[in-house]
Image: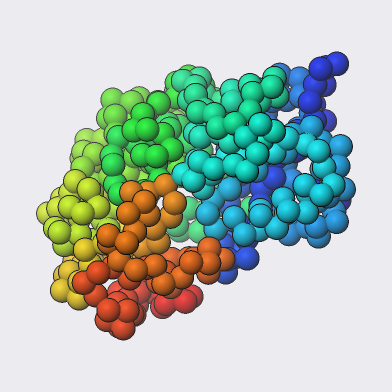
Amino acid sequence: MIQMTPSNPTRSSAKVGLIHPGTDNVAKVELIWPPLGLCRIAKFLADHGHQVTIIEDALNKYPIEEVIKAVADLDFIGVGAMTLQIPRINYLLENIRKHSKATIVYGGPHYSAVKEISDPENEALVIGDGEEAMLDIINGKRGIIQGEASRDYRAIDFSYVDYLKYGDHLIDGTRAISLVTARGCPFTCKFCQSPEMFQLKVIDYPLDAVVPDMVALSKRYNINAFRIMDDTFTLHHDRVRDFCERVKPYNWKMSCLTHVKTIKLSTLKAMKEAGFGFVAVGAESADETVLAMADKRQSEADIINALVQINAAGLKAEMLFVIGLPGETPESLAKTIKLAEKLIEMGAFRIHTQFFAPFPGCDFYNNIDKYGVLIEPDFRNWHHRVPVFVPHGIKLEELMTLAKKFFAIGGRMIGT
């Protein structure tokens, strides 16, 4: 049964429900991540006296009757959705609107990208950060709103969800807590939604707030591992080394994601001493044309050098590749497979491979016909183990044949 989470309501408090929608997508059903953004918004609104609940449809796939009952007396319904969740949230909202007069508030990567709502006078759409924007909406603002990114760190409160039921692990299988210590990314990769979401702004949250929150979360859930979910964790090396000195006494296990051009051996060594075990880097492709078209700002030599430095620091590297980016040809893909095999020989811990999907919000999606053909328009069938897009320059049969070889390098086959 869906119940409201207790807060500290005032006379003017609003009743707010935040929906974490499920999905019928086979790739996302097996592993569901906790809704970090919704948990942060929920705590922020509760701290301002509003009554908030998170409806965990992603975990429970509630019958529509139960969702309708839960939202019947709400003043505001917020939905944060990625593209793969859109079919499910459309179904929920179609039925909710028949029984609720609540103001609908849209947010998350998909809605930030499409920038469209059907009723701008009675609904709202938030692009970017949602905390302050939600307060403005509760106070009467409507339409499309640019959410302002605060430089203050806002702790994630997992008490609004059944946190331990979510999947959250390091790549070695260790149970972990996901955390964001900085928002945004300075790079303009054309396959990524981040440039659209955060307008190339990077906000480093104060470590005086981040580290105590990590301590509190670790104690509360008895979990001693963290997945640092920043887009480019090693962007500011002095900050990373400061972070490492602060967390070293806790003996946590940690992992992060970063860009190959922001890697420095001295920083990696500090990370190793602080408890980091894994660094994931976006290799994407070995082909210079493909990399240039994606505005990745790196070369094959940069990818190899990144692994050399990660190895030298005693860390394990997860190398992330994308099959079928614009510009892909049989020759470029064969070259990338050869690089992946070389990285394994050099000691890469894991090769992670996926098909490119042009999600709304990235530059490639906005100019899709220029780059190739979308062969699967239904978002329910979008996941990275099957192709949904075929770039000009390669046939689907060629893409599939080479992809099978590539996926086998990483230990998984197409469709698994």
x then y, percent, for residue 145: 54, 29
Marker count (numbered): 0
Task: State the image quarter where residue 352 is shown.
Answer: bottom left
Q: Residue at x 86, y 37 (%)?
A: 73
Could you say where residue 386 lies in the image, as x and y percent from the top left? 43, 73
Q: In which image quadrant can residue 413 be found?
A: bottom left
Frontmost residue, 344 versus 286: 286
Q: Is residue 210 above or below residue 177?
A: above
Q: Is residue 404 visible?
A: yes
Determine the residue positioned at 69% across, 33% down: 122
Instruction: Let me know if residue 255 appears in the view.
Output: no
Q: Position of residue 143 (x, y in %)?
A: 59, 31
Left or right: where does residue 296 sit relative to residue 383? left
Question: Which residue occupies the foreground of this view, 319 or 310?
Answer: 319
Residue 209, above or below 72? above
Q: Residue furthest top?
A: 11
- Camera-nearest residue between 107 and 366: 366
Q: Residue at x 40, y 26 (%)?
A: 203
Decide: is 330 above or below 272: below
Residue 262 percent location from the top left of the image: 24, 39
The answer to whether residue 318 is left or right of residue 287 is right
Q: Quadrant of residue 244?
A: top left
345 to the left or right of 57: left
